[in-house]
Image (tube, rainbow, N blue to C red):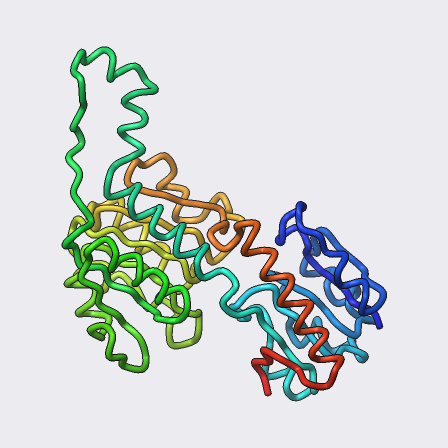
Amino acid sequence: MNIVILDYATLGYDLDLSGAEKFGNVIKYEKTAQCEAKDRIKDADIVIVNKIKMTEEVLKSAEKLKLICETATGYDNIDTQYCKRRGILVANTPAYSSSCVAQVTVSMVCSLITHLKEYEECVSSGEYLAQGNANCLVPIYHEICGKTWGIIGFGNIGKAVAKIADAFGCNVIVNKRSPISEYECVDIEALAKRSDIISIHCPLTPETKHLIDKRIFSIMKRDAIVINMARGAVWDEEAAAEAVLNGKIGGLGCDVFSSEPLPKDHPFTALYGLKNVSLTPHMAWGSFESRTRCFNTVLSNIEAFLNGAPENIINL
């Protein structure tokens, strides 16, 4: 049994991957260029992958391949229809990062709405001392309590964020495919118009690609805080950058990008250093606890598959 891990660096260098060795011969690659993937999996029975695209071209020569384990909840990097035709099972890792992503989402919101960057700079730059006042209250900031928090996508992460927003005293509204009774469900236009805070947690699908476009940004409140914790292509990144630069929204936070790492010509490079912007390097999912849960789920998925009762299969 050959198990190939294509990009273990995405899981962090501190994570113990030795648990996979009980299932067979493990071949580990720190990183894999897209052009290298086809050759590296040609003799694999099981592939463990995070970011490398598992296209028909990459997979067609992997004649022994039986299972692909995605070390994430999202699996838009895998051609699941081709895998289904070939009889290759695809297993993801659901729910492992919900509390972690919710934590970073709320951290971004709190930082942006409270202007923590500016207040920290006031102290570290010496401005606080130079002013000679016991306190500094510029820029003006506002409480989260009483604000309307719009949540796009209401899976495990969206639900975790909603609980925290509730605890802050927010009015939570939700945009999702199937209505629920716990919160008011609205269409995307109503959510954009009404929300003071918007956080995005939906999967990337053909229906959600560029769900937040220039038109949707144009109807948001001018002081709205917008956070993307889903996928970079869920919003139009050029429109998002323009909304910030033209003062159409109050602040932007983002941990995910359509091209990762961010290339030099990405629209968001124009936002570097802005005080009302928080950009992080796709780390929101990756607390030590979260990554440990993720890889343990991968191991459970392999064991279940080998025992003839596969779990978390998304292409049956």
Q: Quadrant of residue 36?
A: bottom right
Residue 135 is at least partly visible in this image:
yes
Q: Nearer the viewer, residue 225 or 285?
A: 285
Q: Residue at x 40, y 52 (%)?
A: 103
Q: Quadrant of residue 191?
A: bottom left
Q: Residue at x 68, y 54 (%)?
A: 8
Q: Position of residue 4 (x, y in %)?
A: 77, 64
Residue 235 is at least partly visible in this image:
no
Q: Is residue 263 left or right of residue 248?
A: right
> Quadrant location of the N terminus?
bottom right
Q: Nearer the viewer, residue 289 or 253?
A: 289
Q: Position of residue 204 (x, y in %)?
A: 44, 69
Q: Residue at x 30, y 48 (%)?
A: 109
Q: Is residue 253 left or right of residue 245?
A: right
Q: Is residue 106 left or right of residue 297?
A: left
**Please, which residue is most extreme toward the front here?**
167
Q: Nearer the viewer, residue 240 or 103?
A: 103
Q: Residue at x 43, y 58 (%)?
A: 99
> Quadrant location of the C terminus?
bottom right
Q: Nearer the viewer, residue 31 or 259?
A: 31
Q: Position of residue 155 (x, y in %)?
A: 39, 71
Q: Is residue 235 left or right of residue 129?
A: right
Q: Position of residue 187 (x, y in %)?
A: 22, 74
Q: Quadrant of residue 226?
A: bottom left
